[in-house]
Amino acid sequence: MSTPSPVRIGIVGVGRMGRRHAENLARRVPGATLVAACSPIGEELDWARDTLGVESLHKDYDALLRAPGVDAVFLVTPNTLHPAQIIAALKAGKHVFCEKPLSLVLDECLAVEAEAARHPHLKVMIGFVRRFDASYQDAHRQIEKGAIGRPFMVRSETCDQNDPTGFFVRFAPTSGGIFVDMSVHDIDLARWLLGSPKPLRAFSVGTIAMHEGLAACGDVDNGVAICEFADGRVACFYASRTMAHGHETATEVVGTDGRLVIGRDGRLTRWRSPTRTASAR
């Protein structure tokens, strides 16, 4: 039996997060090989060449799309660029992985969906990583089996360790704000775990606990939002950029017969009901 050829990937954006993706693609992802890099910043291209041995280097995105031997692109670029770059890649015949969020504008999201539908042979994926986490997948299975009855509330949080360099303050003007940039994972999880209910309305509050520079673009470094769905169920989201102890994510799903807690206190999933408590580590 012949071995499938590796997927040849070009990384677009080789900054803070892009370097993590590039290192994973070059060293840790079976079936993938990193063959090209694109960035308007020369230092980032130098890093890709010197650290990972990437030889096909491009300052222009269209040039990367025209380069021979690239099957797919990884987009780790400013949020405002995602829709146009995804559409351009699809038109060039490339598979696409794009960092979240898909866009800051609904019409742009719909335009990407429409373009993807015109290329059914190509894969397009947004980086909602928690759907592929074993603990969240287990929670989803438990809910589908009725383990906690009818789920009616989700509480979910994404909290990052404080970055004293203020990188995200410089990034904030194009991020879409703390909820779009950070809570997008929790929003996706809530709809997934509740069976994709239609949102009805949302409320949010926030505060600047540490990074006053965010005030210039109307953003905050800690925020809480509540979403009410059309069927009466609710979700509560907490986002923080200032945790002293480190990164932390966790989700709780409350149902009529019990609750599931995912990612809290080092456990994969914890299930509580009137008659039993179970956990997986």
Image (tube, rainbow, N blue to C red):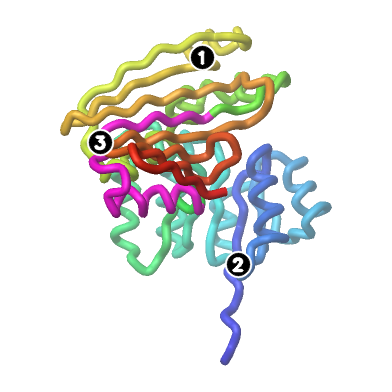
> Could you tell me which residue is drawn at 68 percent across and 46 percent down?
20
Do callouts 1 and 3 mark residues in contact (Cβ within 8 Å)?
no
Please tell me whether residue 149 is drawn above or below residue 54 in the rendered image.
above
Inspect the magenta stretch and tell me whether residue 139 lies in it.
yes
Q: In front: 273, or 203?
A: 273
Q: Residues within 10 Å of mark 3 (few under 14, many from 20)?
A: some
Q: Amino acid at mark 2?
A: Arg
Per the image, the residue denoted by label 3 is 256
Name the N-terminal-most of marks 2 and 3: 2
Residue at 33% across, 42% down: 109
Q: Quote the CA–CA distance across marks 2 and 3.
A: 48 Å
Image height check: is 203 above or below 184? Answer: above
Q: Given this view, does label 2 or label 3 mark the residue nearer the observer?
A: 3
Say which label, 2 or 1, has the lower sequence index.
2
Q: Which residue is mark 2?
A: 8
Q: Which residue is mark 1?
A: 220
Total residue callouts = 3
Q: Is residue 227 above or below residue 55?
A: above
Whether pointer 2 and pointer 1 mark residues with C-beta atoms closer than 8 Å, the reply is no
Looking at numbered disc 1 in the image, what kind of residue is underneath it? Val
Asked whether, in this view, residue 95 is left or right of residue 149, the answer is right
Question: Horizontal and vertical percent for residue 110?
Answer: 28, 44
**SS label for mark 3:** loop
Locate residue 188 relative to residue 33 in the image: left or right: left
Residue 254 belongs to magenta span: no
Please state the horizontal and vertical placement of residue 46, each as a whole percent of the image.
Answer: 79, 47
Instruction: Say which of 210 and 273 sits in front.
Output: 273
Q: What span is colored magenta in the figure?
A: 134-158
- Residue 40 location (% of width, % of height): 65, 41
**Separation of disc 1 and disc 3 at Cα?**
35 Å
Q: Amino acid at mark 3?
A: Thr
Please tell me in which quadrant of the rendered image residue 231 appears: top left
